[in-house]
Amino acid sequence: MAFTSWTALHQSLLDRLADFAGGKSFIAESASVNTGSVSRDIKYRNIDELRQAIEYAATMAAYESGAAVGRTYAKTVRPR
């Protein structure tokens, strides 16, 4: 599977988890994301790896949509 956005990958992974929860057999797969600036391969062989992939894709989708903000630190100001 190839995706151009983290949001699309996240939804696809959630659909895979829903299929498994609905009684379908688990199938190990891989997916790739190429957003132009980032290219990444995601592989999962068991349900735990699928859940980790879902978490990672959700985090990246939040950054992609602007919903998440990276951690910022205050700069120390030195007196002159």
Image (spheres, rainbow, N blue to C red):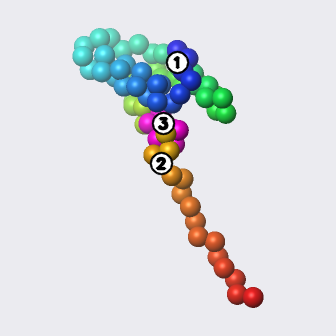
Marks 1 and 3, the one that precedes in the sequence: 1
The quadrant where residue 55 appears: top left
Determine which residue is flagged by label 3. Answer: 61
Q: Is residue 59 visible?
A: no
Quarter the C terminus occupies: bottom right
The quadrant where residue 26 appears: top left
**Which kind of residue does numbered mark 2 sit on?**
Ala
Using the image as rendered, state which of residue 72 and residue 40 is in the foreground: 72
Residue 30's tag is 1
**Is residue 39 highlighted in magenta?**
no
The quadrant where residue 14 appears: top left
- Which residue reaches farthest right? 80
- The stretch in magenta equals 57-64
Mark pair 3, 2: CA separation: 9 Å
Determine which residue is flagged by label 2. Answer: 68
Q: Which residue is found at the position 41% from the left and 13% from the top?
A: 27
